[in-house]
Amino acid sequence: MKLLITLFCLPILCFSQNPYPQDYFKSPLDIPLVLSGTFAELRSNHFHSGLDIKTQQRTGLDVIAAAEGYVSRIKISHYGYGKALYITHPNGYVTVYAHLKKFAPQIERYIKAQQYQKESYEIEVFPNPNELPINTNEVVAFSGNSGSSGGPHLHFEIRDNAERPINPMLFGMDIKDTRRPFVNAIYAYPKDRHSHVNEVKKRQELRLIPHKNGDYSVEPLEAFGDIGFGIVSYDQQDLAHNKNGVSNIQTFFNGNMNFEMDFKRFSFDETKHLNRYIDFEMFKTEKTRIQKLFVQPGNPLSMFNNVVDDGYLKIEDSTSSVYKIRIRDFKGNESWINIPIKGKKAKERLEAYELKPNYYVQAHESMTLEDKNISVYFPEDTFYDDFHIDFAVRSDTLKLHQDIVPMMKNYTIRFNIDNYSEADKSKLFIAKLYGYYQRPGYVRTKREANHLVARTKSFGTFTLAQDTINPTIQPLNFQDGKWMSKSKSLKIKVEDDLSGIANYRATINGKWILMEYDYKKDTLTYDFEDNVISDTEHNLKVIVIDNIGNSSTFEATFFRK
């Protein structure tokens, strides 16, 4: 198959030497490559680990092996990557292809045999090197929209032998991009009460002045003490309107580099620290991701380079300084922000007393908070900083601070349910309340004797909720007692409005059938090409269970030749 795009083109890497092979991996799609997502761009609770390649708003495009190798892992799940394929190559790298519609016939037969053997749609297998060998340019799958994908596209990754994702563009993938990165906003951060910017001792947005040449400036500041900055920025390629992540950010204080964020490679165990890198409070309250150009305690991101004094500037009285920020995309297009700073010690002012909650959390120590029938346990190092916490219990409702604090670990909420009857206990779960109308959302809940227990990684308001309603099951493309010989699949709609679908099982004439659950459309789909049924009369039985254990059973008969 002739590829329209290959990965031989060396990108402009004027700011670093590229150690990765440029002529090894080829394009995973036989169409011009247009991106909807770039490597390491900022996502909810993680850095993006690959490239999201547009598939022309379609599913079913050929997905091509980027190089020879063997299928080393196949994972199918309702959420996350959906249907994902991993190919290990002789040079030690692994390519990943995710959100697939289905696999190539040989791989599809292999994985479906495993699914039928285990009687499970969700599955993860690790084939031996000789089971599913792959040639360069071989079609290995078809693009889709499975898992937590927000629209049809191919998620493509390259990982090293330590399972660290690397920007695929470093291997020669060429994406047309002649535009400079954009800057939406810039913020100043006094480090402590001894510092100020324009006599303000807390975060403040600065007026950003765009220039015709694509650069930016800020009006001269008056500052004193240790201060840092944060920016809101994005990049756009020539063929797409998506606001994607940038590739590199550097800062310079009086001509000397004092901070660099280089989005080339990271490990999955560090990606959670994105919430420490951004201004988490601003993200949760304003949906704005400010990238902080300084390093706070407890943030071990390997993408930090050339950091001096943690990226903070030490501004002394009666001095003049210049701070510059350079933002670059992968192709070397760059934008600059110029910030002149005058050192001026502010007059001491009597600061207003701020009323704090009664409880104080020390980040590096474990802590338990208890009141009435509710307890909360924080393991040590759950948080980055010490802080005052709001903890209040009223009846069966827990008000736990605001969801503005980044966390490194889950903490545990425990409700005592001694006062409930046995019948009610079986229908209770821990819910988090969302939005203006405080709609309850299911939090994964375990029953331990007379306690309900949940582990979570966010603050908010939690309560006990009850789910007594069974899931609903409705046929979509067939009717009871009718023929459906011309149909390629069997489709059923399943819904549960409160705790959500936990499990399901479907059989025809007593034989288990593989039904794919699409939570975005609330559908179960069986593909008749599986050829596991051969009779004319088919008795279908579907059992659906929600997260509390409420279940519904649907039965119907259809005919097919």
Image: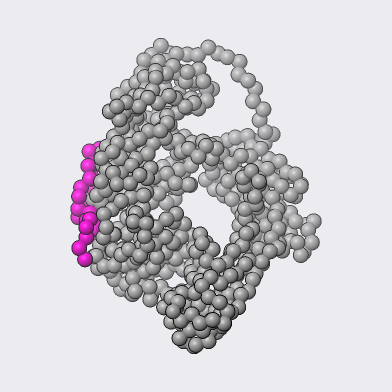
Total numbered circles: 0
237 left or right, relative to 309: left
Q: Could you say where residue 210 lies in the image, as x and y percent from the top left? A: 35, 27
Q: Is 268 colored magenta in this rendering?
A: no
Percent position (x, y) of residue 527?
45, 75
Magenta: predominant secondary structure element? loop
Can residue 2 be found in the magenta stretch?
yes
Q: Quadrant of the N terminus?
A: bottom left
Which residue is drawn at the image coordinates 60% and 69% (left, top)?
473
- Residue at the location (53% across, 75% down)? 478
Q: 81 or 255, which is in the foreground? A: 81
Q: Relative to 151, does residue 176 appear above or below in the rendering?
A: above
Q: Which residues are magenta?
A: 1-27
Regarding residue 87, the answer to whether it shows in the image is no
- When asked about the image quadrant of residue 146, the answer is bottom left
In the picture, which quadrant includes the C terminus?
bottom left
